[in-house]
Each structure stands twice: as C-alpha cells, then as structure tokens.
Image (tube, coloured by chain):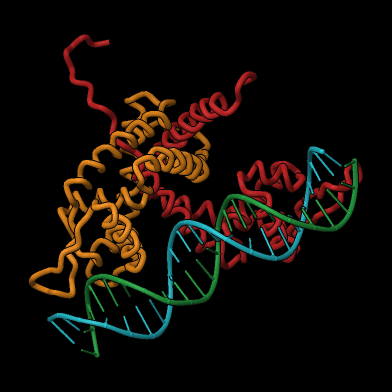
Chain colours: A red, B orange, C cyan, D green
Amino acid sequence: MSSLPVVNQPPHRCGALLGQLTRRLQTRSESVLTPLGLRPRHLIALTVLRDLGGSSQQDLAKTLEMDGTNVVGLLNDLEAENLIERRRSPVDRRRHVVELTDVGIKLLVRAEFALAAVEDEVFSGLSDEQRETLYELLQQATHKTNIEACREALPPTC
Amino acid sequence: MSSLPVVNQPPHRCGALLGQLTRRLQTRSESVLTPLGLRPRHLIALTVLRDLGGSSQQDLAKTLEMDGTNVVGLLNDLEAENLIERRRSPVDRRRHVVELTDVGIKLLVRAEFALAAVEDEVFSGLSDEQRETLYELLQQATHKTNIEACREALPPTC
DNA sequence: TATTGTTATACTCTATAACTATA
DNA sequence: TATAGTTATAGAGTATAACAATA
C-alpha cells in the first residue's frame, strides 16, 4: 500500500533448494525402507491402495502417474511378499481388483512411522511453526498449478 | 508465550508436496531446455563451471555429486557443442582444466532466462512475498541438515 | 473392435572395473 | 604406488510394442 519508489526485487529462485531437499528426503527414505524390504515406489502404492480401499490396476497406474506395465512389476513384488491381493472383478473379468492384505496394512503402518522420523530429521532446521508455514506454502503452490495444468490439458470442460 | 493447555499438533508432512513440486519443475525445465539442446544436468554443470570459474573434472564431480565417469560423458556432450573447453593443466598434466567458452556463457544466459520463466509459472500460486518466505524456509532447512550431514560423515574434525 | 493385464524388449541413467597417462 | 581421466559394461528405472483374455 506504500507509494514509495521502492525497487521491486524479483523473488529468489527456489528450484535448486527444492531439488536438494527432495533428493535428501529420497535418499534417507530409501535407507529406512530397505530394512522393511520396500522401495519408495512400493510404499506409495501401498498408501494409495489403503486410501482408495482397493483399485483396478489401470486406475492405480493413473493415480501413481506411472506406466501401466511398470505397475504390473510393482504389484508382482508386493504380491510375492503377500502385501496385496489381486482378484478378478466379478462384474468385469478383465479387471483385477487390487487390495491390501492384513500383512500389507501392518507393514505400511511401520513404514509410515519410519518415514515420519525421516521428515523430522530432514526438517530439523525448522520449528514446528515454520514447518507448518512451509506446508501451507507448498500446498498453495501445488494447488494453483494443479488447476493451471488441468486447464492446459483439458480443452473445454474444466 | 501462552500457558494455555493447548494440544501440540505435530506439523504436517511436507515430503509428498515437495516431491510433487520438484517433479513438476523438472518436467517443465526439460521442456524449455530441449530446444536449446540441453538437459537439466548440462545446465547444472555449466552453472557450476561459471560460478567456479573453471574446475578439474574430479572437483566438478564432487560439486555435482555425480560419479566421475558420468561427468566424462556430460563434458563430452558439452565439448561437442563447443560450450566448454578441456585443457591439460600445466602444473599437473594428469588434470584437465574445464572452462566455459563464450558460446557456453551465452547459451547459459539464455537457458537461465527460460528457467526463470518456468519458476515464475510453477510458483504462480504464490505472491512474491510468499515465494521469498518459501525460499528462506528452504534455505534454513537445507543449511541445518547440511551441517548435520557433515557431522555424521566426518569423525573428528567437523 | 476396444479394454485389461501381461510379456518381451529397448532406451536412459547411473555405477563398477579395468585401462592409460601422468605423478 | 597413487591419482586423473577414459572406456567398456552391467544394473536399475522407465517406456514402447505385441499378445491373451474378456467385453
């Protein structure tokens, strides 16, 4: 609201720092997941399956933003460890309904505890209040550009 | 400063949002760099070389946190486009001194303009003030854990 | 004919080992 | 012998194409 002739400095670039923190989080997450026999991808899949309460493989591929062929391999891993189940859908026998097993649910809970500890460590330079601010800023940024991306991708409706 | 019996909520997890924004930034950066014949890796290398004013390949590998063998390939690309020069160090002929060419400097400037525009777009959901806050939080977070990482890695001195 | 899941395959990125030349 | 750079090669991660079963 000031009309002083202040020179408007452009904001600093966040990209490099963002990438650096993400890489650090990724590396440490891998470390704590390895003893549980999981890779980050596996964990994301398990989380999505719990949140959706089961899914077809194609829907899962869309949600994970992965190629369908890679979802097959991912689910093969998880099924081999008895963490998920594939059942033919009774209404459309082409579809596989994928669901978490009890073993999968329990392992997911353990993994989430481990990952929470990783975040606490990586963000230990910030106070709880600062972390909350960071969260809100990131959410605002992702949400805005989500809408933008949607507008770009879809022609008429959105 | 309040002594009310407020329940301390743990802060939200930032990891997922951080990863999402980073991926978005990465994808769009690739898009704008492709017409310039560059990949993100190339740009990071060019930036580091300018900031250091030249470097040996090993030092470059350390700075980029990449394997030395991959730096060779990276530099081969850049040299083929006449963006960098390798010269034998006169004091230690095992070393290659790597420096930007004039062509490299000019292309770097163009790439940075393009990337600034990408950041402006990806962070368009935030005001300049919010972007600055985000920058400061990210910087504080990365710096703290940098020190931590250093303490972990080095036994006595640090 | 289109859709779901699968396999086989190729392409990229990254890391390991062995080689050359210099010290 | 150790170091700087290079090459060849193998291992992940990911994407494309063809195929089987079902709609």
Q: Quadrant of residue D7?
A: bottom left
The image quadrant where one finds the N terminus of chain A is top left
Res. A101 visible in picture: no
In this view, the residue in front, B124 or B49, is: B49
Seen in the image, is A5 located left or right of residue A83?
left
Residue B79 position within the rendered picture, expressed as x and y whole percent measured from the top left: 26, 57
Q: Is residue B135 above or below residue A46?
A: above
In this view, the residue in front, A9 or A96, is: A96
Q: Is residue A32 above or below residue B6?
A: below
Number of numbered discs on residues: 0
Q: Is residue B140 above or below residue C19?
A: above
- Residue shown at 70%/60% (left/top)? A78
Seen in the image, is A34 located left or right of residue B61?
right
Residue C16 position within the rendered picture, expressed as x and y whole percent measured from the top left: 43, 77
Seen in the image, is A25 located left or right of residue A54?
left
Query: Which residue reaches farthest left?
Result: B91
Residue D14 position within the rendered picture, expressed as x and y whole percent measured from the top left: 57, 53
Residue B149 position within the rendered picture, expressed as x and y whole percent measured from the top left: 34, 60
The image quadrant where one finds the C terminus of chain A is top right
- Residue shown at 21%/53% (left/top)? B49
Q: Is residue B86 above or below residue A124?
A: below
Seen in the image, is A40 located left or right of residue B76?
right
Res. A26 visible in picture: yes
